[in-house]
Image (cartoon, grey):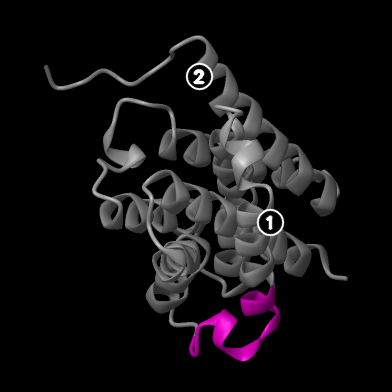
Amino acid sequence: MDIIYFFDLAGTFVFAISGALTAIQRKLDIFGSCVIALVTALGGGTLRDILIGRQPVGWLLDNNYLLIIAAGIAVSYIFGQRVQKLRKTLFLFDTIGIGLYTILGLERTLGLGLSMPIAVIMGTVSAVFGGVIRDVLCNEVPLIFRKEIYATACIAGGILFLILTALHMERDWAMLATVFFIIVLRTLAVKYKWHLPSTH
């Protein structure tokens, strides 16, 4: 399996779980959970594809995305009561998701010959906007608008990936290193309360 396709399916799966767990926390019904899981998993990638002119958007051409989302929802409900007791479970899936989707957005954009700054922006869009839609629908202030290191971690990871590839690191290893970097940076930022300055 192509590593980009693997990252895409893996990101879809973990974001579907993230969305479904959020819906379960908010006590939404099964339909609401499915909607939240769907928009969390596909929202960022859909917006990215529209912006870069990739038509039709990727998931419309491959039913595996819907199967992966259904699997994520099932996992959330089957193990939901257990994982909800672990306060960091939702954070973990969300963090893995932004790491995977940052790389995916970068690769999709660079593959179209667009510039490196645009690729970093599209990587960040891919990573965070599914979560933005999820939080808005669940009546929460999106993480991207809070002080937490969230979108910033994706931007830093995107820049790291460009540096590693410029230094001729093997591409697959550069991708894995970038995903690991984003996950570690966000985890450390939450643990040690690193944040961007607020407006007040």
- The residue type indicated by label 1 comes to Val
Percent coordinates x, y for residue 149 in the rendering? 43, 28
> Residues in magenta?
55-67
Residue 121 can be seen in this image: no
56 drawn magenta: yes
Find disc 2 in the rendering and name its residue. Answer: 189
Quadrant showing the N terminus: bottom right
Mark 2 neighbour density, 10 Å: few (under 14) some (14–19) many (20 or more): some
Q: Is residue 66 above or below residue 157?
A: below
What is the secondary structure assignment of the residue under circle 1?
A: helix
Q: Is residue 59 above or below residue 169?
A: below
Percent coordinates x, y for residue 153 in the rendering? 50, 34
Quadrant showing the C terminus: top left
Find disc 1 in the rendering and name its residue. Answer: 75
Q: Is residue 117 above or below residue 5?
A: above
Residue 66: image quadrant is bottom right
* Residue at point 58%, 24% (across, down): 187
Residue 65: image quadrant is bottom right
Q: How many marks?
A: 2
Residue depth check, mark 2 versus mark 1: number of the one nearer the observer: 1
Mark 1 neighbour density, 10 Å: few (under 14) some (14–19) many (20 or more): some
Percent coordinates x, y for residue 176 in the rendering? 78, 44
- The residue type indicated by label 2 comes to Ala
Prevalent SS, magenta region? helix
